[in-house]
Image: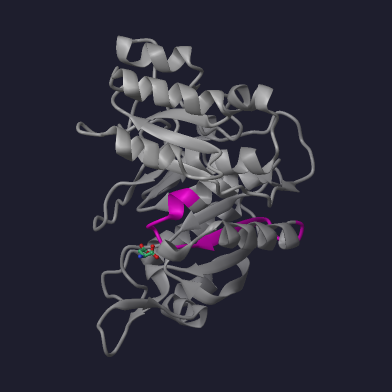
Amino acid sequence: MAAKREHSKILLIYTGGTIGMVKDYHSGALKAFDFAKVVEGIPELGQLDCAIDSVSFRSPIDSSNMNPGHWVTIASIVEKHYSDYDGFVVLHGSDTMSYTSSALSYMLENLEKPVIFTGSQLPIGDLRTDAKENLITSIQIAALKEEGLPVVREVGLYFENKLYRANRTTKINAEHFEAFASLNYPILAESGVHLKVHKENLWRNRIKKPLKVHKELDDRVAILKLFPGFNRDLLRGVLGISRLRALVLETYGAGNAPTETWLLDDLKKAIDSGLYIVNVTQCSGGSVIMGQYETSRELERMSVINGRDITTEAAITKLMYLLGSKVSVSSFGTIFETSLRGEMT
Ligand code: ASP
């Protein structure tokens, strides 16, 4: 689809990440720097036909230091400025970008404007940096309008020529410019000679309602990855965490787990005493199909929640969001298994 760029107002939210980092003189390690440096590094920003304002975290951070408190800060900035801007671009380290952007997709209910996450693998000052293209195109995407309305109306993640639905992404490479993948959902837009938007893949709210920002997140959650040799002590260690309310169980293939009696007994006991367990595959692509193999039938019988083709990032943040929203015990599984923001098929 060839969408037009009308004059738009964009807010850049700078949280940190490699994009704005500089080398520490003594240690040689990269550390977050202030936003003025980022803007200085891209004088081309002045040529874009949209008005750009920016806000920055007081102390920009490496995204390894991100936590739900920071997600609330980002959501609150969007909420505060929602009616003043046509779109938002969040500059964020790539390491935990899929977690933050997945969380934001749930926190910003009824979103009707673009919130585009981006960052880079090399700092803005590096000669071969990927930061310029990522930032400039993210702004252009956030500024796209059609008949006066934003074209993208969801939380997206733009990296190395591709716009993804954020809650479908995973960081798959620590050094390639193409650092993210969305194996279970097609891309929303791609940048080449033309900026091509795949309109059929964009999220559209069925009913238009005012933006509702959810700031209650419950972090009493855990992720447990199965591996051959996984033992009962480890399982008991995790299930014994006091106050644990929900667990993402990363299983093999199409949602399979060993059929050892101790494993099934302990999981069932935990579910019966109120723990929510979600079955998410360790594979980057494809879906959990509970009951397809004998090795997942027991999980299905004991009411393990089916994560289908959700990513671990989108699953753990969805648990935090649903627990924080005080969803009732009787509907928790059904709501989890429902796609709320296009995070599962
Ligand atoms: N460690 C950095 C971060 O996530 C890496 C990056 O920005 O890509 O903040």
Q: Is residue 262 left or right of residue 17?
A: left
Residue located 77% across and 35% down the image: 208
Q: Residue furthest bottom?
A: 26
Residue located 29% across and 17% down the image: 259
Residue extent of the magenta highlight: 83-99
Placement of 291 over or under 311, stated as above or below:
above
Q: Quadrant of ligand 1?
A: bottom left
Which quadrant of the figure has residue 237?
top left
Q: Is residue 247 magenta?
A: no
Does the rendering let one see residue 137? yes
Placement of 331 over or under 186, stated as above or below:
above
Q: Which residue is at the front of the view, 127 or 156?
A: 156
Q: How is the image coloured?
A: one colour
Does the rendering let one see residue 196? no
Residue located 24% across and 55% down the image: 176
From the top left corner, tell me how far across and down residue 71 is, in percent.
Answer: 58, 57
From the top left corner, tell me how far across and down residue 341 is, in percent.
Answer: 59, 35
Q: Which residue is at the front of the view, 178 or 196?
A: 178
Q: Which residue is at the front of the view, 334 or 211?
A: 334
Which quadrant of the figure has residue 310?
top left
